[in-house]
Amino acid sequence: MTTSPDATGRVREHFRRKAFSFDHLYDEEHALQRLLRPGLFNRRELALEVAHEYDTPSVLDVGGGSGRIGELLLAEGASRYVDVDLSDTMLDLARDRLARFGDKVDLVQGDFLTTPLEGPFDLVLALGYFDYIEDAAAHTRRIGELSSGSAIASFPRWTWTKGPVRKLRYEVINNCPIFDYEREQLRTLFADAGFERITIRQGRSGFLVRADR
C-alpha cells in the first residue's frame, strides 16, 4: 500500500493552514508547552544527544517543518542540514529561522518518497512525521537508504484518553489523516530498513525510536 495522492494533499493543506500554531508548540520559552507536551521536548533532546556523537554531523530532517530542531543542531556544529517537507508555509518559517547558517541549509519542498535527496546522512530525523503516514514501511525503507549512521523517529500510540480526541480533531474537523503504531511493528519496520540496533522508548502517548547501523 502506498500513500494516496489525496491523503498527501490533505496533509499538505493541513500544515499550510496550521503552520504557525505547529511552530508555536516547540516554543520552549513557554513553560506550559513543556508541561502539556513533554514528548515534543524529549525527542528534541534525544536528537541533540545523538548528534553530539558525531563531530560535525550531516542531518536530514524528514518533515522538519519550521526548522526549530535544525536551528539547534546547526548552532551546535552540524555541517549540513536538509529539511524536506510538504508544506511551503512551514519551510518559509524555516527559511527565516535558519538564514544565518547560509549554505549549510537546504530546504526542500516535496514528498519524501519521491523527492531527490543527496545522501547519505549521519543522522536522519523523522519527529512528528509518522503521525500522518499511511505506508510507514516505504518511508522507513527510504530512511534506511539515506542513513549512514543513526535515525530517530517518533510514533503515536493509541490510548483511550487521547486517541479519540486526536481522531476527531484531525480527521473529522481538519480533514487530515492520522495513524497510530504498536511497539513490535516499529522494531520490524526499522529492522527491515537495514538497521541493526533498535531502541524503543515508550511515553505516555507515543514511542521514540533510535535506530543505528
Image: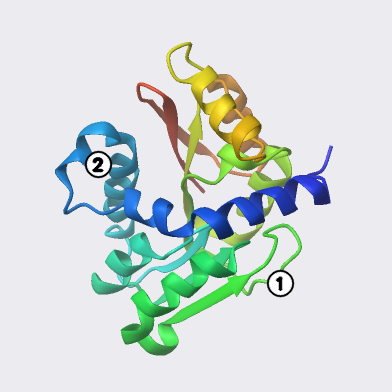
Residue 88 position, x and y percent, is 58, 69
Give how far apart the Cα atoms at labels 1 and 2 are. Answer: 35 Å
List the residue tagged with mark 2.
Answer: 33
Visible residue check, residue 177: yes
Name the amino acid type tagged 2.
Answer: Gln
Mark 1 or 2, nearer chain start: 2
Name the amino acid type tagged 1.
Answer: Pro
Left or right placement of residue 173 versus residue 125 in this view: right
Residue 86 position, x and y percent, is 63, 61
Q: Nearer the viewer, residue 25 or 64?
A: 25
Mark 2 Cα shell of 10 Å, populated few (<14), some (14-19), many (≥20): some
211, above or below 150, in the image: above
For the N terminus, the quadrant is top right
Q: Which mark is residue 116?
A: 1
Among the 4 quarters of the image, the one containing residue 33: top left
Left or right placement of residue 2 versus residue 81 in this view: right
Left or right placement of residue 79 versus residue 151 in this view: left
Q: Nearer the viewer, residue 190 or 40?
A: 40
Residue at 56% x, 38% y is: 131
Identify the secondary structure beneath mark 1.
loop
Residue at 32% x, 69% y is: 71
Residue at 64% x, 30% y is: 172
Left or right placement of residue 208 versus residue 168 in this view: left
Looking at the image, do the residues carrying marks 1 and 2 touch, with CB atoms under 8 Å apart? no
Mark 1 Cα shell of 10 Å, populated few (<14), some (14-19), many (≥20): few
Q: Nearer the viewer, residue 210 or 30?
A: 30
Going by the picture, which residue comes out furthest to the front? 173
Q: Nearer the viewer, residue 51 or 22?
A: 22
Visible residue check, residue 157: no
